Amino acid sequence: MCDPEQESCETHAEWQHEFENSFKNQTTINDIKATLPPNSPRRSSKTLTCAILNKSPVKPTRNGSMFSVNLCDNEKSLTIRAVCFNEDIYPKLESNKTYELESFKVKKSFGDKATSELVLDHETKITLAASQVQIEDCSYTISEILRGETGDKRFLNVKAKVVSLEKPCVVGTFPETKTKRTVCVGDMTGQMELILWRAG
């Protein structure tokens, strides 16, 4: 029997957790995105271990409220959006924390029917993961971005306000059209343009 005061006990517990996890039916963001989105929301039987990159405020809807989160896993090169219409889940998710998600739904993305997004609901089991994905703090001012100080960072955090918003315009040839919208944002150090794209 392991002595709790010995360091080997902690090592044994970590090994046991990893051993148990190896039998779980795991999936990754890459697996989800590599599969064609289902025609109707489909509940997954697999477990996704992912980190919360950011979390939107709760927004009112016709039937209640909703919020969204952006997720990444150990690869960090891919992200996926998850939406939730259950406000009770909101305090269970914290930015930069890693969770195991079970019994979530996969559906066509609202903005792009060719890609998938997740739905978290009252049947989704959310557990804090034992192994946390290391998320680097990548907060920058607009002037730092314009000066190229972000290096090879893939995800950036910018705190800014909307200065102007152009009307959306449709580009491309039917049926492969996209809606483009230009947004100018600014902070105390400068301004920059963001291009928003939406399929259809």
Image (cartoon, rainbow, N blue to C red):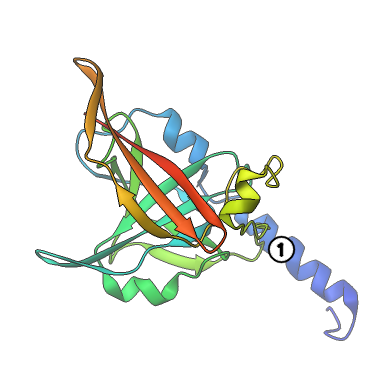
Percent across and percent down for residue 29 are 49, 41
| 106 versus 132 height, above or below | above
Q: Residue at x 84, y 78 (%)?
A: 2
Which of the pair 6/160 is nearer the observer? 160
Q: How many marks?
A: 1
Where residue 113 appears, as percent x and y from the top left, is: 26, 32
Where, by quadrant of the figure, is residue 146 drawn? Answer: top right
- Look at the numbered disc 1 and give the secondary structure of its residue: helix
Q: Nearer the viewer, residue 43 or 58?
A: 58
The answer to which quarter of the image holds residue 129 is: bottom right
In the picture, which quadrant includes the N terminus? bottom right
Q: Residue furthest left?
A: 62
Question: Is residue 49 shown left or right of residue 167?
Answer: right
Q: Are there few (<14), some (14-19), or many (20+) residues within 10 Å of tag 1?
A: few
Q: Is residue 85 above or below residue 116?
A: below
Asked if residue 171 lies left or right of residue 32, the reply is left
- The residue lying toward the viewer, choosing from 158 and 163, is 163
Q: At 42% from the left edge and 42% from the top edge, which residue is drawn?
A: 194
Q: Is residue 178 above or below residue 19?
A: above
Amino acid found under the numbered disc labelled 1: Gln
Residue at image point 19% right, 16% down: 175
Towards the viewer: 105 or 57: 57
